[in-house]
Amino acid sequence: MAQAKKAVSKTSKKQVSRSAPRAIPKTFQNYIGGKWIPSESGEMFENINPANTGDVIGRFPLSTSEDINAAVNAAQEAFDRWRKTPAPKRAELLFRLGEILIRNKDQYTADMTREMGKVLKEAGGDVQEAIDCTYYTAGEGRRLHGYTAPAEMRDKFAMCVRQPVGLCGLITPWNFPMAIPSWKLIPALVCGNTVVIKPAEDTPLSSYNLVKACEEAGIPPGVVNLVTGFGETVGAALTNHPALRLISFTGSTDTGRIVASACAERNAICSLEMGGKNAIIIMDDADIDLAIEGAIWGAFGTSGQRCTASSRLVVHKKVYRQFVSKMVEHTKALRVGNGADPRVDVGPVINADAVDKVIGYIDIGRNEDGATLSCGGKRLTRGDYANGFFIEPTVFSDATPDMRISQEEIFGPVTTIIPANSIEDAIQIANGVRYGLSAAIYTQNVNRAFQAMNELYTGIFYVNASTIGAEVHLPFGGTKATGNGHREAGTQVLDIFSEWKSVYVDFSGKLQRAQIDQLESAQ
Ligand code: NAD
């Protein structure tokens, strides 16, 4: 269960950090009603660099439900004024926010690599995604289109408009620490909602940076509130708060289920973005070198800690041996290390708990499942690796589709190669998991590409590209255990953060009854 996992994770992180030499870390605060204030509990937790656990990035408030109550009250107070601020004016503040994000991109990037571990280039991409999302979505301030429709009766006008849903709780994971909060925050704001953000406990600094930029952009007090702390306490308090009309959650499928149940209980809107077990299909006519590049990038980018990671490679038997041998060769060439070093390809995993989980799955793959461990498989602990959470990029081959390493989300630098006999077989294997986020095919055959596009039951699909690399102006999300039918990004995200109001204007000056009088009035 996610609850137990996080509790263990936090304890072990603190234990590690106490045994290492350290400078006095900076103290951060919650942002409530336009003020930076400590938690009501007065307690703090530490944000630690996963590449060097002696490096404590900062101490953040270990908040309680009291802090959530205060933040929700602030969001409530600000709501009426914000929703009545014309959308183009709201958007002007968001464009200003975009400028601030651009100005500080390098600092935010360095902060992110330090707190999350991903290499600088990818952290820069994460910040850029927040910038792209801000500009793209702020543009909606001058659109937020509704529509008109013909009415059934004469002298009657019918139209639909969007209105804000109200107060929103945003719960985010650590793997995209600025992009994912921005994907929720910016559309929520442009639609006229006020929010309380609860970032992942492993990466609060990137959300702090985003919220600080909101303050600088002049977004009014109470519109954006930030409360840091653990999921089981403040995340749960947010999810259960009766004044929040909507919870937007991204994280594991296990936690998402808890959030969804709590929202169902109190009839709140709930949008969920959850886990993945994404497959690349490599056909016998594929450009193998291109496929290898895509597979390496998709499997080991962000140390495999992406919801869209290419954690399964389904390879046609005719090119199987060739593919496995090239994949192993390229995987062994990857440089593991501190993401702040520009020569590094693969950074650490997020925390001690993630190390245990990933190494546990490697043991399962080797022993219980009986797949071939083709390379990697070990935690790195010597020299520069001694104080971090480093794991060798790992490839399993000769796996079958039903093995646990082929089915379960490992969320680390591990990928599993599964042989397939045909395109039909490959599609069946790719579809044969509980998740449905992203899929890809490498082929030179346009018919096969479209067949796969048509039959793979995922929210995202790529041809001759890896399973990762979404762009902000297209909808993002998944099927089955990955989501609950919503899509973030694109204009589709507006359907999460606004509710439709149908408006009828009868200018006939008489009573006209829909369904009853329509034939009469049509004469
Ligand atoms: P997680 O579920 O452990 O935590 C996510 C967030 O939920 C954190 O802020 C956490 O504090 C909070 N939380 C934990 N318990 C809670 C509770 N009981 N009530 C309310 N909130 C609670 O996930 P994680 O480890 O941070 O992130 C990794 C997971 O996120 C992976 O499964 C990954 O696939 C998924 N993810 C999905 C997407 C997507 O768009 N589909 C994107 C990124 C990550």
Image (tube, rainbow, N blue to C red):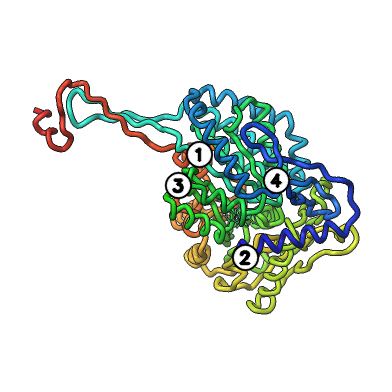
Residues at badges 2 and 1 in contact (C-beta under 8 Å)? no
Q: CA distance from mark 4 to mark 1?
A: 21 Å
Q: Residue at x 54, y 37 (%)?
A: 473
From this view, report whether residue 123 is shown above or below residue 480: above
Q: Secondary structure at mark 4?
A: helix
As shown in the figure, which amino acid type bears the numbered disc 2?
Val
Question: Circle 1 is placed at which residue position?
Answer: 167
Q: CA distance from mark 4 to mark 3?
A: 25 Å
Q: CA distance from mark 4 to mark 2?
A: 45 Å
Q: Secondary structure at mark 2?
A: loop
Is residue 281 shown to the viewer in this render? no
Question: Circle 4 is placed at which residue position?
Answer: 204
Q: CA distance from mark 1 to mark 3?
A: 11 Å
Neighbor class of circle 2 (other Cα within 10 Å; few <14, some 14-19, many 20+) is: some
Could you say where residue 206 lies in the image, as x and y percent from the top left?
70, 42
Picture quarter with ligand 1: bottom right
Could you say where residue 135 lies in the image, as x and y percent from the top left?
59, 30
Q: Is 202 or 235 nearer to us in this picture?
A: 235
